[in-house]
Each structure stands twice: as C-alpha cells, then as structure tokens.
Amino acid sequence: MSQKMWGGRFGDGPDDIMEEINASIGFDQRLAHQDVAGSMAHCQMLIDTGILSQEDGRTILDGLNQIEKEISEGTFTFSRALEDIHMN
C-alpha cells in the first residue's frame, strides 16, 4: 500500500517517531486469528442478509481463509507501516 488509509488534509506524513509510537502491530499480532474470525463472521452475515452476493462473499471468505492459513503457517507478512492488525 503506497498511501496511508488516513492522512486527510495534511501534506506531510507524521515524523518517524510518531509512527514508532503509534504502531501496535507487534502487540496486535496476537489477535490475528480472532480478527480474521471476526471478519469471516461479518462477511457471512453480509451474505445471509443479502448485502453481499454469494459469489462476492465466497471470494472474500476464500481470501480470509488464505490469510488465516498464512498466519497459521507463519508466512503472513505483517507491516508496521499499516499500524495495527485491522489494517494488515
């Protein structure tokens, strides 16, 4: 990801020290399995209510299953630049 999800009206990014202080991915990695499980449950709810089509929902769930597999195998690359578990 080349740009931060946030940034708004600021022309410059935060100082390196602010990114260091703000990044929580080192701690958040422990929540990875639960975060994926929550995303899968949310996706299933969107399918069940008809907000997502079966096809789109299946695509998302397949992607989440792949992420879960990579996390379990230790091959998923967490990025400090993305700050927390929800952005990774």
Image (tube, grey):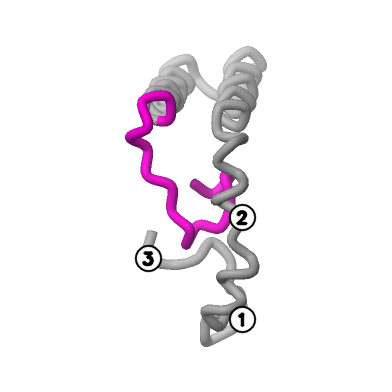
Residue at mark 3 to residue at mark 2: CA–CA distance: 19 Å
SS at mark 1?
loop
Is residue 51 in view from this perspective? Answer: no
Residue type, numbered disc 2 = Ser
Check disc 3: other Cα within 10 Å, few if <14, some if 14-19, many if 20+.
Answer: few
* Tag in front: 2 or 1: 2
Report how many numbered discs are placed on residues in the image: 3
- Is 12 located above or below residue 82 in the figure? below
Q: Is residue 78 magenta?
A: yes
Q: Quadrant of the N terminus?
A: bottom left
Residue type, numbered disc 3 = Ser
Pointer 2 or 1: first along the chain = 1
Where is mark 3, residue-wise? 2
Pointer 3 or 1: first along the chain = 3
Which mark, by number, is residue 24?
A: 2
Picture residue at 59% right of the left edge, 61% below the top: 23
Check disc 2: other Cα within 10 Å, few if <14, some if 14-19, many if 20+.
Answer: some
Measured from the top left, where is residue 41 in percent x and y? 63, 20
Pointer 3 or 2: first along the chain = 3
Q: Are the residues at dot 3 and dot 1 in contact (C-beta closer than 8 Å)?
A: no
- Is 67 located above or below residue 84 in the figure? above
* Tag in front: 3 or 2: 2
Magenta stretch, residue numbers: 71-88
Q: Quadrant of residue 17?
A: bottom right
Q: Is residue 53 left or right of residue 86?
A: left
Where is mark 1, residue-wise? 9
- For the residue pair 48 and 31, the one nearer the viewer reads as 31
Measured from the top left, where is residue 22 in percent x and y? 64, 65
Picture residue at 62% right of the left edge, 27% below the top: 34
